[in-house]
Image (spheres, rainbow, N blue to C red):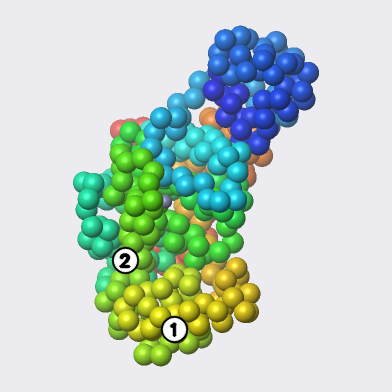
Amino acid sequence: MIYGTRLTQAREFCLLTQKALADDVGISQGTLSNAERDKSELPMHVLTQLATITGFPIDFFQQGPQVTFEGLPTHFRARAGMSMKEAGQAKRGGEIVAEAALAMLSQLEGPPLRLQPHPIGTAPQAAAAAAREALGLGPRDPALGLPVLLEHVGFQVIALPLPNTRRDAFSLWINDHPILALLDTDAGDRQLWSTAHELGHTLLHRDAGASNTLEQEADEFAMHLLMPLEAMNKEMPTHPTIQDFALLKRRWGVSIAALIRTAHRIGRIDDHRYTSLFKQMAARGERLRERAAIAPTKPRGFRAMAETLHGPHPAQGLARAANWTPAFAEDVLSRHATGAELPSRRITNVISLSSRRARRA
Ligand SMILES: [Zn+2]
């Protein structure tokens, strides 16, 4: 037998409607819909076709899902321009990869969770200061490599093989595990901001649904986490130019746009200068593509767990364990850093995972 939820996961991950997938395998939409709701079985030859089209092996459909985001508050704001389909694809991809991550974690001993959620109403600035301390960041330290820093304090950070220009990350709690999912981007400053924003949701809004206030709070948290005002006061020149902002961007890893907003906030530039800086950027096409590009950070934990359990080339073993194809396993693994790819020497190959079984032996 197969699990209907698996069909939905695979179909939505492939951006297919029920009608399109049903047509492709020569069944009616009603038949597929019934199968997705566990109301009818599909013959093996149809299942074989479904597996081929979606790229998930038959085993995947025969094993019930251990992780579903249904009914959980997921901080996933579909921005204007991101279709429901794309949002669904990211969510399903998140379920599939998070399931594999938690399954591996259950066999290992990862770092303990050292960042706990705050009660609703906690000020974002206070939460950001506490988070910086827990992450081991001094008052003048940029939060570069944040995805990996978070893994060190017990977060599950997963990178999904899905490009998206509208939304870069989302987060949720599964039982007592904070999960942060990163989508593909080539802009490290955007990735850093999204990661900090989602961390804000994770710590401030554990059980809250979506609302505009929460979005503002998450951005406020991100600003204080990534650009502590005290440090900005010290480092921001008196009459900052775009070139000054570009230098600060390289050091702090945040966008020029975010730095301009912070300069305005601490009174280093007035309203007029603020508007003129953004006009300058727009005139040079830098609102869309800023100068001083920064490479994104790959998280490490997922790959580190797979290597611990399956050896230095873990794609085959991971594919077998997760009921994925080796190609999909390789695709997901490639979004996560090898030990050699870790961003800086300061960030060590911590995710010191040891097999529980090995430890007992
Ligand atoms: Zn948000």
Amino acid at the residue labelled 1: His
Residue reaching furthest to the front:
272
Nearest the camera: 13 or 141?
13
Kindly state the secondary structure of the residue where label 1 is placed: helix
Residue 4 screen position, x and y as percent: 57, 19
Residue 89 in the image, given as x and y percentages of width and height: 58, 39
Q: Residue at x 49, y 35 (%)?
A: 95
* Above or below, comparing residue 229 to residue 79 in the picture: below
- From this viewpoint, is residue 328 visible? yes
Rendered location of residue 332, percent (x, y): 58, 44
Residue at horizontal 45 percent and vertical 57 percent from the top: 194
Disc 2 element = helix
- In this image, 99 relative to 127: left or right? right
Quadrant housing the N terminus:
top right
Compared across the picture, whether 200 is left or right of 8 comes to left
Q: Which mark is residue 198?
A: none
Nearest the eye: 298 or 165: 165
Q: Percent x, y for residue 77?
A: 47, 47
Residue receiving disc 2: 224
Q: Residues within 10 Å of mark 1 (few under 14, many from 20)?
A: few
Where, by quadrant of the figure, is residue 49 drawn?
A: top right
Q: Is residue 355 above or below residue 20?
A: below
How far apart are labels 1 and 2 at the CA level? 24 Å
Image quarter for residue 295? Answer: bottom right
